[in-house]
Image (cartoon, rainbow, N blue to C red):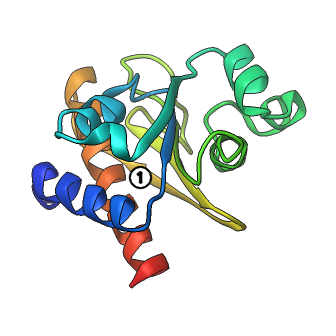
Amino acid sequence: MYRSVNNTLKEIKEILTKRNLKLSCAESCTGGLISSYLTDIEGASNFIEINFVTYAIEAKTRFLGVPIKVIEDFGVVSKETAYFMARGLLKYAGITISTTGYLGPSGGDINNPVGTVYFGFAYKDKIKVSKFISNKKERKEIKADIANYVLNEFLIFLKELFG
């Protein structure tokens, strides 16, 4: 299991505010849940710049600059799409989080079953993309599991960047 989301959020806030960094999120499968968690803590306006729920392909291409060719060649749920989502967000803020995945009950395939998320973090020229597969069964549980996992991984990313 992951750390308490509340402790994770407090540490994220501390690191971002100490460095005067603004965060932007582009969420697809998590539908704004990561943004919701982040804004649950007091002082979130000190470290959040702008967040998007880019569920539609057009939103990913229009607001984040994801090349349509990337989506056509690799799929909307892919490490490549998560990469370009995270990178595209850098025009809005200094550090970013992106998510794209399958919550179910439909969607998914043998390589990316329901519960799969690709998520990306970007800061300057450092972009990290990873994959996680939730073992939860219900859509809301999968979404919460993914959001918690991604936030924990983001905290690790911040600690790798800033010590």
Tell me residue 118's x, y (percent). Answer: 53, 46
Confirm whether residue 138 shows in the render: no
Tell me which residue sits at (17%, 39%) in the image.
Answer: 42
Tell me which residue sits at (68%, 64%) in the image.
Answer: 124
Tell me residue 86's x, y (percent). Answer: 63, 47
Which sits in the foreground, 35 or 15? Answer: 15
Split into 4 quadrants, where in the image is the C terminus?
A: bottom left
- Compared across the picture, whether 77 is left or right of 138 comes to right
- Compared across the picture, whether 93 is left or right of 136 comes to right
The image shows residue 58, relative to residue 83, as above or below, that is: above
Please tell me in which quadrant of the rendered image residue 45 appears: top left
Please tell me in which quadrant of the rendered image residue 157 appears: bottom left
- Compared across the picture, whether 51 is left or right of 66 comes to left
Residue carrying label 1: 132
Tell me which residue sits at (46%, 42%) in the image.
Answer: 117
Tell me residue 128's x, y (percent). Answer: 59, 64
Counting every numbered tag in the picture gives 1
Which sits in the foreground, 90 or 2? Answer: 90
